[in-house]
Image (cartoon, grey):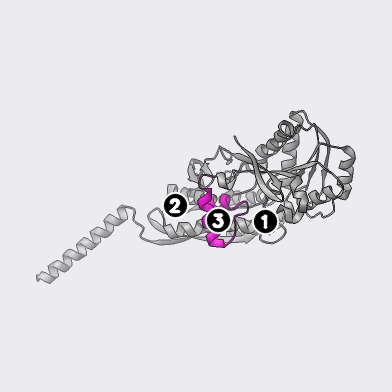
Amino acid sequence: MTKSRILGRRATTFGILGALVAASAGVAHADETVKIGEVAPLTGPASYLGKDTENGARLAVEEINEKGLVVGGKKVTLVLDTQDDAGDPRQATQVAQKLVDDKVAAIVGHMNSGTTIPASRIYSDAGIVQVSPSATNPAYTQQGFKTAYRVVATDAQQGPALADYARRTLKVRTVAIVDDATAYGQGLANEFEKRAKADGLSVVSHDATNDKATDFRAILTKIKGAHPDVIMYGGLDATGGPFAKQARQLGMAQKILAGDGLCADDLSKLAGDAADDVICSVAGSPLEKMPKGPGFMRRYEKRFGTHPVLNSPFAYDAVYVIAEAMKRAGSTAPDKILAAMPATNYEGVLGQTQFDSKGDLVHGTISLYKYVGGKQTLLDYVKN
């Protein structure tokens, strides 16, 4: 045998051995494209919040792909399958079924409690993990679905935080409550009312409007006659802003307590000067107080040319939680991801993310804000 043949055979043998060693060492040797579903209202009055949510998820996907994701020895490329549910429960279920048919590996969404809850049954039936970045109604994770998770605190924490603030800091004795009859607004208002009564506050009225309303003068006139010390509004800023504005136009000086649906930097665009009458809560830490918040803000602003609004850091961490579950499972199969989710212990922008047996955060945070000259200002934040 010639020397060149011997060297060629040795090179082939070493090449085969090298490939086997590389495979056994877990080096990525094949490409796989995996879809992550993301759902938020991209049309309608809450579309700016929905776009912020999408941006957070997109930033995470792009970063993960740039760093390189290896799952079970395969190089995985994530693709964000973004859908618009318009904040409508019926459209949410249609979108959910579409994502199941698209064979997504997991879901980040939905944004609203009123869309997250009806969609959750479809994901549960399909065995696909759903991580909501913003749905705060406790009912979402109380249905017994093993697929339901969230990376945000709940109204069972948010409502009481508002009620406690009213009693301890504002020193009020009476309160009027209004909600927009959605799963989010009504759920938050109900949790507030339970704690308010437990705190010894008198609830003089509890009225319902809807999430498309524009004229609140009839309800406000009724409330004005009852002379409550404070008003609690459960709903989003699209209605809550005009509600506060019309209250001031009627000469009402009461503070308006609200949840994260109203707690946005640009509330003054909807409420005008009446934004200064609002005290609101956010089911999470202030971005500047999040362990990795400042870095996230810089990356977000560089990528999208605008400031984070509200939900983007939560959607961002939700994607990373799913990616970490894939790595622990060594698989991108939905059932394997689902099996790995309870062991989540992820340190991200939000801080430490761990889930209890229902899929809620083990450690939740509520932040309280006021407005000064239309600018959001942190009052306090409370961890459970």
In the rendered image, residue 34 lying in the magenta stretch gets the answer no
Three-letter amino acid code at the position of disc 2: Ser
Residue assigned mark 2: 331
Is 333 placed above or below 2 here?
A: above
First reached walking from the N terminus: tag 2 or tag 3: 3
Residue assigned mark 1: 92
Residue 83 visible in image: yes
Q: Quadrant of the rendered structure where residue 300 is?
A: bottom right
Q: Which marked residue is nearer to the observer: mark 2 or mark 3?
A: 3
Give the quarter of the figure containing the C terminus. top right
Foreground residue, 290 or 187?
A: 290
Residue visible at 89% across and 48% down in the picture: 218
Residue assigned mark 3: 57
| Span colored in magenta | 290-316
Q: Quadrant of the rendered structure where residue 355 is?
A: top right
In the rendered image, residue 303 lying in the magenta stretch gets the answer yes
Three-letter amino acid code at the position of disc 1: Ala
